Image: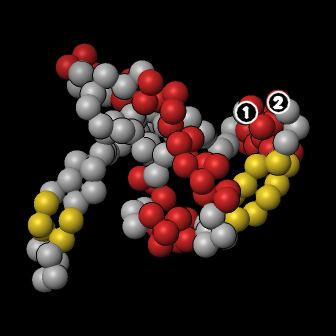
Amino acid sequence: FELAKKNEDMYLFSPYDVERVYGKPFADISVTEKYDEMVDDSRIRKTKIKARDFFQTIAELQFESGYPYIMFEDTVNKANPIKGRITHSNLCSEILQVSTPSTFNEDLSYDHVGRDISCNLGSLNIAKTMDSPDFAKT
């Protein structure tokens, strides 16, 4: 938001190049900590855009459709009392848990089982539920 406030440019980075240069997936890189370094690194392909235009477009899309949902990783992790970083969430961003990747052996057996997050949603037909003789048991 700081770049948008100042009406400055911002950069979008190639996740493939970031992984190639840093040796770990883009999701495991703190963009806040590495942003200037990635901007200056000629090995990483990037696209320069106007920060204010970018956030304006997102605001318009959210107003019109409700999407995209956005999770601000730094804000989420400031409030995270659990050891580890939260790097992603589910579509609606209501699941915020630390996760770690699994690693595999050459034969694809687990070398290390990581921690995954899961969002399990269900739905029901409210009219049928209300009319059910079992409703009081739920």
Which residue was labeled with disc 2? 5
Q: Position of residue 87 (x, y in %)?
A: 42, 44
Q: Identify which residue, 8 or 106, lies in the foreground.
A: 8
Image quadrant for the C terminus? Answer: top left
Task: Establish if 14 lies above or below 113.
Answer: below
Task: Establish if 125 lies above or below 26.
Answer: above
- Three-letter code, disc 2: Lys
Looking at the image, which residue is at 37% across and 25% down? 80
Applied colour scheme: secondary structure
Dot 1: element: loop
The label on residue 1 is 1
Q: Identify which residue, 22 or 121, lies in the foreground.
A: 22
Q: In the displayed image of the protein, which residue is found farthest to the top?
A: 136
Looking at the image, which residue is at 49% across and 46% down? 30
Q: Identify which residue, 108 or 91, lies in the foreground.
A: 108
Relative horizontal placement of residue 40, taking residue 129 as reference (left or right): right
Looking at the image, which residue is at 49% across and 69% down? 21
